[in-house]
Image (cartoon, rainbow, N blue to C red):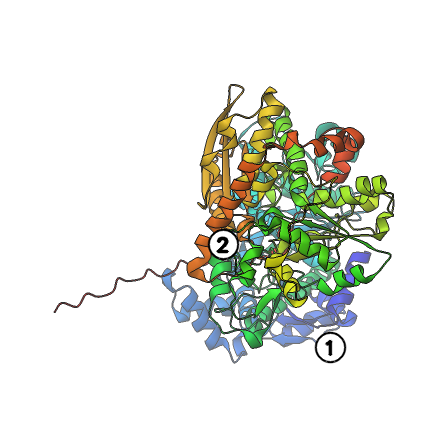
């Protein structure tokens, strides 16, 4: 007996389930019932006349002691069963008497009723009856699982070849039920087989091969096309497992052949789940494996039913039946737990029709229920503007809120219920430590919003006062994140140029400066990950430069440097905590060194200045420290929606043509302003480049869905996305403004950033002399090996966070009826 079956029986024996065996007239079934009873992992129920079964068992020397036997003709619930079955078949004209006769004369239908009424937890049949008979009984009496459109089957095949599959174990589908599956059914079968592998085999890393007589285009035909379409459907579903096709069996199983026929496939040579293109090929294959190679084939295991029903091969042995009973028990335990979750689920988060759900461990946002007034502003911002609340199910996620840390909920909360998680005490400890060198860097949108907190006009440019305040708070060096923005443009524009010339399949290129947008992509649209620029955000570029290039130049131990970013953005708190943000640590071979240590928002900085009794209005102007103090106007406008786009085009023009950007590029009006989606086209070296600037994740979701529906991605070369409406100037960490003043405040900030750009003699990132020095003395050139190591990153598919319900869409809002007009 295999280790797999032993472990399975041990698991299910902890929760004994009742399994009905309706084919009790079969000696093999009686022998299996005896084994199950003796091994004690389930409670078998036999269907038939007790006296007849005992006599047969006695002749065959089978011990039925302690096994329950139910006689349909004397069973007290036969009337209820008959009424129930007749109601299910009412549209077919079935009467109660006809239902009774079927139940009295066909044990499979009677056994299915025992399962439907929860008298038995599952049913195993098919040793005598055909598969179609067993499936018909299950469908007519029990029905399909809610949300399931395809009832299929799988086999668990156990081989003595541990180098293949999952330690020699495979899940095969469908070799018994669906004769000629459509592409949609093939995709459904693949998903069901993965669930079978996880639930029963406990496969941790499912790898699905959709089989055919062709490998990656080596052959053609209708069956091959169907498999290819199924693969595309799985891609559209964003499933949380590896799959590939079309693959021949040898390419799916043998690594050596996989390298020849399907190089680069995530599944070829490693498959542990095989989906056959039709029943003919699957049925022939599993029987040959069973009888020529000595493999054990358990099944057919039905999938897609509301309750557990297992089919058997009519050539099965008593041991096969015993093993399938164990699998049926496993399904019963799993499905019972699933039903209990459906019935008993109550979120620990209260009043979710009024509030946003905030996890206690959220690194950016915190919630105080005592201060909440249930005004619904946070929920409306999260749901309607950011398209987060309502687009996932707490039940599906295990009651874990999905958050991209944008902080818009905290920006709208006027009662102090939703606030940012502060790191101010930790920063103060570093400032008070004489061994530490504390370095602040400030984002462009901070300098046009900080003044709001001190009674200044909206959009007041307080750059010099801000730098002075940070020095008074204890900063040893103050650097301009605009420098990091110029660095980002050098890398991102170079990457875009490379894609235009060499990797057009990776167009459009999406910007990656906004960490909330990056998280949003990883969770909801992971198929777009290859299109995200690998260039880090300005903050995450400047910080490793501080702890490598600057540390070397100033002969400072990088372990003693504490970097603090001041941002309009709460999601930077999450970004700097990402595990891969330790490029400087890897450079110095000290992985514990983080690139950016702490983050404070504009609101937090204003409160800190107030708490220290610093008269902000009276502060003198101060300049950023050199080395990373120079910046271009292009770096400044990063704070506006469309700013990254415009900055990139200015440098792309130079990198592509060698020409300085003209007036059209220095004031690219089509991507400026507060509109949620702004499209434009430019001519660049005889090429027409289509670009889009988007702000607000709700707008991004709509745009992506529309592009996918129209299959029109290839129209665009470059797409900028900022999570917050208006861009960073409207970030979740900015000073709060009352709703009537929100738009005027944003417009004033936007105009101030463009005014600084206009006043700056350096308009394009490539013209920044300090950036040029950094490349000449340290990095080499954009996208060099060292640049890739320190300035670029990778992303993670986080779609699994959504759980099974991975495409939740909130119901449409009811239309508001116009107010009635009262005629006098």
Residue under the image location 71 percent in, 28 percent down: 261
Helix, strand or loop at disc 1? loop
Q: Residue furthest bottom?
A: 76
Q: Residues within 10 Å of mark 1 (few under 14, many from 20)?
A: few
**Vertical comparison of 498 with 305: above or below:** above
Residue 337 quadrant:
bottom right
Percent coordinates x, y for residue 413 in the rendering: 52, 66
User: Of residues 318 and 599, which is closer to you in this image?
Assistant: 599
Q: How many numbered circles are shown?
A: 2
Instruction: Please identify the quadrant where the N terminus is shown.
Output: bottom right
The label number, if any, that marks residue 65 in the structure image? 1
Residue under the image location 69 percent in, 75 percent down: 67
User: Of residues 198 and 444, which is closer to you in this image?
Assistant: 444
Helix, strand or loop at disc 2? loop
Query: Which residue matches tag 2?
Result: 458
Percent coordinates x, y for residue 69 in the rendering: 63, 75
């Amino acid at each position: 007996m295999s280790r797999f079956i032993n472990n399975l029986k041990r698991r299910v024996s902890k929760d004994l389930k009742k399994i009905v065996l309706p084919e009790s007239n079969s000696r093999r079934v009686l022998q299996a019932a005896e084994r199950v009873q003796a091994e004690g992992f389930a409670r078998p129920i036999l269907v038939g006349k007790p006296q007849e079964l005992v006599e047969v068992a006695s002749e065959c020397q089978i011990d039925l002691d302690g096994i329950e036997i139910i006689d349909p003709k004397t069973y007290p619930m036969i009337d209820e069963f008959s009424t129930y079955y007749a109601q299910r078949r009412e549209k077919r004209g079935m009467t109660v008497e006809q239902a009774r006769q079927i139940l009295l004369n066909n044990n499979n239908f009677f056994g299915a009723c025992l399962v439907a009424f929860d008298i038995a937890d599952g049913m195993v049949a098919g040793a005598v009856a055909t598969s179609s008979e067993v499936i018909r009984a299950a469908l007519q009496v029990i029905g399909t699982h809610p949300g399931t459109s395809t009832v299929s089957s799988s086999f668990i095949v156990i081989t003595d070849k541990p180098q293949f599959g999952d330690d020699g174990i495979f899940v095969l589908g469908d070799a018994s039920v669906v004769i000629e599956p459509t592409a949609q059914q093939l995709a459904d079968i693949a998903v069901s087989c993965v669930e079978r592998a996880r639930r029963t085999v406990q496969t941790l890393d499912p790898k699905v091969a959709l089989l055919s007589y062709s490998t990656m285009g080596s052959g053609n035909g209708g069956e091959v096309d169907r498999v290819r379409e199924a693969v595309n459907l799985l891609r559209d579903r964003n499933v949380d497992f590896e799959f590939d096709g079309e693959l021949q069996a040898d390419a799916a199983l043998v690594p050596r052949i996989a390298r020849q026929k399907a190089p680069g496939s995530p599944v070829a040579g490693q498959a542990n789940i095989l989906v056959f293109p039709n029943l003919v090929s699957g049925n022939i294959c599993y029987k040959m494996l069973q009888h020529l190679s000595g493999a054990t084939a358990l099944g057919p295991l039905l999938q897609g039913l509301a309750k557990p029903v297992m089919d058997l091969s009519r050539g099965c042995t008593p041991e096969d039946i015993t093993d399938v009973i164990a699998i049926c028990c496993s399904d019963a335990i799993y499905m019972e737990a699933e039903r209990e979750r459906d019935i008993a689920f109550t979120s620990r988060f209260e009043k979710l029709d009024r509030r946003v759900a905030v996890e206690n461990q959220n690194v950016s946002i915190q919630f105080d229920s005592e201060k909440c007034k249930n005004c619904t502003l946070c929920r409306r911002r999260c749901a309607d503007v950011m398209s987060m609340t309502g687009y996932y199910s707490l039940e599906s996620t295990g009651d874990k809120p999905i958050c991209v840390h944008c902080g818009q909920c905290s920006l709208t909360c006027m009662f102090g219920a939703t606030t940012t998680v502060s790191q101010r005490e930790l920063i103060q400890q570093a400032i008070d430590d004489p061994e530490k060198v504390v370095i602040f860097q400030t984002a462009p949108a901070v300098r046009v919003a900080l003044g709001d907190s001190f009674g200044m006009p909206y959009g007041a440019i307080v750059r010099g006062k801000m730098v002075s305040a940070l020095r008074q708070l204890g900063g040893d060096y103050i650097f301009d994140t605009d420098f990091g923005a110029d660095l980002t443009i050098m890398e991102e524009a170079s990457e875009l140029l490379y894609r235009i010339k060499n990797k057009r399949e990776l167009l459009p290129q999406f910007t990656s400066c906004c960490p909330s947008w990056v998280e949003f992509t990883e969770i909801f649209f992971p198929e777009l990950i290859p299109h995200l620029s690998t260039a880090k955000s300005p903050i995450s570029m400047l910080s490793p430069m501080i702890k490598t290039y600057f540390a070397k130049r100033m002969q400072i131990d990088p372990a003693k440097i504490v970097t603090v970013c001041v941002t309009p953005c709460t999601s930077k708190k999450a970004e700097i905590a990402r595990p891969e943000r330790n490029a400087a640590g890897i450079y110095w071979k000290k992985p514990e060194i983080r690139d950016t240590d702490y983050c404070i928002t504009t609101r937090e900085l204003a409160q800190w200045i107030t708490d220290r009794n610093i008269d902000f209005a009276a502060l003198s102007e101060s300049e950023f420290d050199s080395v990373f103090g120079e910046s271009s106007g292009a770096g400044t406008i990063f704070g506006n929606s469309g700013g990254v786009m415009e900055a990139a085009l200015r440098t792309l023009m130079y990198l592509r043509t060698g020409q300085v950007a003209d007036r059209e590029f220095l004031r690219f009006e089509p991507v400026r302003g507060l509109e949620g989606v702004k499209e434009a086209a430019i001519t660049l070296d005889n090429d027409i480049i289509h670009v889009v600037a988007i702000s607000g994740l709700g707008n991004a979701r709509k745009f992506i869905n529309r592009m996918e529906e129209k299959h029109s991605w290839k129209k665009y070369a470059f797409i900028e996305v900022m999570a917050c409406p208006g861009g960073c100037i409207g970030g979740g960490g900015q000073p709060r403004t009352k709703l009537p003043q929100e738009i005027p405040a944003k417009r004033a900030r936007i105009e101030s950033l463009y005014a600084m750009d206009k006043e700056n003699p350096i308009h394009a990132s490539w013209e920044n002399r300090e950036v040029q020095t950094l490349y000449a003395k340290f990095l080499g050139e954009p996208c060099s090996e060292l640049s890739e190591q320190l300035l670029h990153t990778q992303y993670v598919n986080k779609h699994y966070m959504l759980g099974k319900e991975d495409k939740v869409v909130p119901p449409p809002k009811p239309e508001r009826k116009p107010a009635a007009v009262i005629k006098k």
